[in-house]
Amino acid sequence: MLVLSGLAAWGVPRRAAAWVGVTGAIVGSLVGLIPAIHVLADGTTVAAQAPWNLPLASFAIAIDPLSAFFLLPVFSLSALTAVYGFGYLKHHRGRGRAGTPWLWSNLLTASMAAVLVARNGILFLVAWEVMTVASYFLVTFEHERKQAREAGRIYLVAAHIGTAFLLVFFLKLAGPADTLDFNRFLQGGPGGIAGTLFFLMLVGFGVKAGFVPLHVWLPEAHPAAPPHVSALLSGAMLKMGIYGILRFLPYLGAPPSLWGWTLLGVGLGSALTGVLYSLAQRDLKRVLAYSSVENVGIIAVSLGLGLLGLTYDSPPIVVLGFGAALLHVLNHAAFKGLLFLGAGAAVQSAHTGDLEYLGGLLKRLPSTGWAFLLGAVAIAGLPPLNGFVSEFLLYLGAFRAVANLTPPAALAGACTIGGLGLVGGLAAATFARGFGIAFLGEPRTQAAHRAHDVAPSLRLPMLVLATACFVLAFASLWIVPALRPVLAVATGIPSAILAAEVASVGTTLISLTEVTAGFLLLLLALAGLRKLLLVRRAVATSITWDCGYAAASPRGGYTASSFAQPALQLFAPMLGTRVTNLDPLGPFPTEASLATATPDSFRERVFGPLGRELARQLARFRHIQEGRVQIYVLYIAVTLVALLLYEFARVR
Amino acid sequence: MSVSAGLTLVLSAVVSPLYLGVIQRTKSFFAGRAGPPIAQTYFDLFKLLRKGAVYSGTTTWVFRLGPIAGPAAGLAALSLLPQGPAAAPWSFPGDFLVLIYLLAAARFFTLISALDTGSSFEGMGASREAAFSALAEPVLLLSIAAAARSTGQTSLSGIFAGAGAALSRGAAPVFLLLAVALVIVLLAENSRIPVDDPSTHLELTMIHEVMVLDHSGPDLALILWGGSLKLWILGALIVGLLLPIRTGHPWIDWLVFAGGMFVLALVIGVIESSIARLRMNRVPQFLVGGGAFAVVALALAMR
């Protein structure tokens, strides 16, 4: 349709093509948004079909409310990050072809859109692969750095393991049908293999979404990519995994309670692991990458609770769970996009993302600092911004389960409440630290001292996303009712019940918005009151209280590592923080040092050894592949003869 | 918003500093001192409000945001709290979540305004506060979940109204356990002994006080008021859950509520006078202990 042709046309690479790339991205995205909004407003489905001469394949595409909903963050973020990228990539001119990043980022947008509209398994997988490859090249954009190459390699391996699971998933789901068109999937219901299918789907999409322990690629890939790409990867591409789960769950039939519990458990594990590692990181972009794991975990918890609502036949829980998941998808796109762009601006102006070398950036990058603070409040799930609204819906679902349902569902609610409470507190600590250490206090290095605000093309997207955080919070009372067609597709509960439940959530959100708006007004009123009190009084400027020790160096300010230490120590066995301590010795100690590092224990303890062992075992087969053409011809001949014999035996 | 609800909001906002005085008098009594007048907090507030202010050259507008966030969040949270016979101005399913997260937002702004000074002391206080409150939050939420389970309600007014019936159905153990958990949260969140000592003198040993070292004048007054609002809110939450007595006569109900608040202040004073402050690395265990009470309460309620 419109979308695909428009997107394909602007992906063309050209030398010095920044203008072409950015215009294409913006125009393509805006054109793509039109049908998406149209479908969401009407609640209808637009479909098209064309034959494709590949086995099992066809060009079956459609935009239903679910696809349209996920198209929103994809296209909005693509347009905004393109503007940011235009300013950011100016500094990288003269290295290779200027059009290359634009080719890949525009191709990434197009492939995400294709994933969302595809209605055939093969088409879906092709789009999925293009998405993976395009994002791989974006991750390894700065391929001179070893870290980026390493990140790209891990990402590629992880993504293909996921795709392998998805391939099996689609073939199983198709059953005896001669096509992988979605509308021909298992009309008689999946029967006994539903559990296997759910598992395949969870792993296949979980790799992309970043569920623990399949998240290992994520904290490597996101920091390695340029910031506008990280924003797109984290804000939109991770959500493709969530979309996949929402899209294919209805094909698997009525969910047993095990599925809901699995998603809930995986989600809580991801959220807690994500937030703890996020708190432990020194690099601002790694903080954000791990916090994506946390937020995807929160989305998974919401989905798990919603699924349990389906199992135990409780529409309020279904609506609140799925509604929280959908709303959090939008919210996370807004604030995580914003934070990655803000972190990118900080890194560009201070030449490092290491929190221990930043500080005092708010005075030097005032507008970036403002935007980053708003993003931090939003992502910590605090009122009055949008992150709070989606977490509120999830909590409310959990509390309703605890208050009104039978013990198994109530237990799920209780686990959600306890887990989310802990995660929420730790997230607030993480982002108080991320913002406070980088943007407040005194600059810890000369580079941070000399930092200055970034170009307007970098500030504009941040401004738009910060506004979006406000709008998504205060317009949630209209947004959630507007999600009704999306919820109808995702949950399949009868429309009369759905309408009533959505309306009651809407009413609750009206009151909630009134109170949070009141909080904002009170803030303004009290600020005014203080201003009034201080009129014509002595307002002096002095130094920070330093116990009378007047020669303090900014390096003496509290560090990011020290800030995180009390919380991390509580979870030390889980995190495996390594402490290298050199105690001062003797009456005149010459040297002393303390170093802490928290590497990803899943990578260190599980996947690293696993990969090495696999490589060792596979090395045994290496003598098969020894490089002489004659031997390879022999292999081919032997295989053919063997196949012939097999066929011969079968026919007889 | 009904008139009585609005009046209650204003009245509790005005009365809340008195609560600190009651606790202080109890502590003085146990220490064998005369102690400051009960209205001492008001004197402090007026003194500070009349003063000018000193700001560190390091700080930005973030530093000035911290002090106003406390009372703003406190007042907004009060509007969600039914007190005595007065209904809450706003009541809806999950209103207590907004209440809890408003207080969390205030804490967040206090944390960043402490970090804005660039001082190591304040960074340390912020770091401790962040870690301990992350543990206190699930305890608070799980306690309310236990109450929600016993009453089958998901709004504060519903829970308070249903608490009486639940108690008569034999939910008393649940409410006792969750009361213990809530008192632990109250002590931790309001920088009380055994978690924190509001009257300590060494920066290195403080948690909350050290975060506001650099605030002065009206800013400090706002912080003080915000703190007393927070104490009042958590106190009223506990009293509302434990004393669900509704006679139908508003004056008697008011008396019961006021009496409950007074007894709670005495209890806090007694706790503060009778036990020593915990070592900093024991505080998490104290909070996890509170969590255990909340979990057992919830498990009992789910039976």
Image: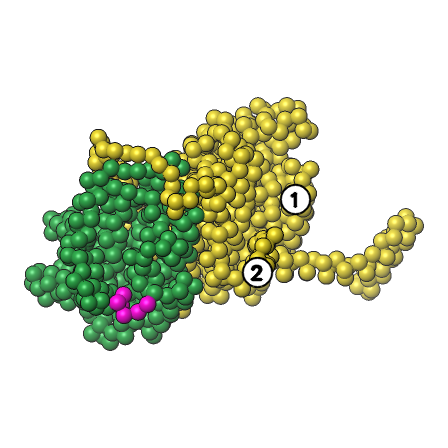
Chain colours: A yellow, B green
Gap in Å between the C-alphas at discs 1 and 2? 22 Å
For image coordinates 65% across by 31% down, the residue present is A100
Mark seen at residue A605: none
Residue A15, percent from left and from top: 66, 24
Q: Amino acid at mark 1?
A: Gln
Q: Quadrant of the C terminus of chain B?
A: bottom left
Mark seen at residue A576: 2
Q: Is residue A513 above or below residue A316?
A: above
Q: Residue furthest right?
A: A630
Q: Would you identify the image quadrant in which residue A309 lies? A: bottom left
Q: Is residue A63 above or below residue A503?
A: above
Q: Main secondary structure of the magenta part?
A: helix
Of residue B31 and residue A442, the one placed in the foreground of this image is: B31
Of residue A247 and residue A137, the one placed in the foreground of this image is: A137
For image coordinates 29% across by 57% down, the residue present is B199
Mark seen at residue A147: 1
Of the two numbered discs 1 and 2 in the rendering, the one whose residue sits closer to the viewer:
2
For image coordinates 49% across by 60% down, the residue present is A569
Q: Which residues are magenta?
A: B271-276
Tell me the subunit letter for badge 1. A
How packed mark 1 is, by other alpha carbons closer than 10 Å (few <14, some 14-19, many 20 or more), is: some
Callout 2 secondary element:
loop
Residue B285, percent from left and from top: 41, 67
For image coordinates 15% across by 60% down, the residue present is B84
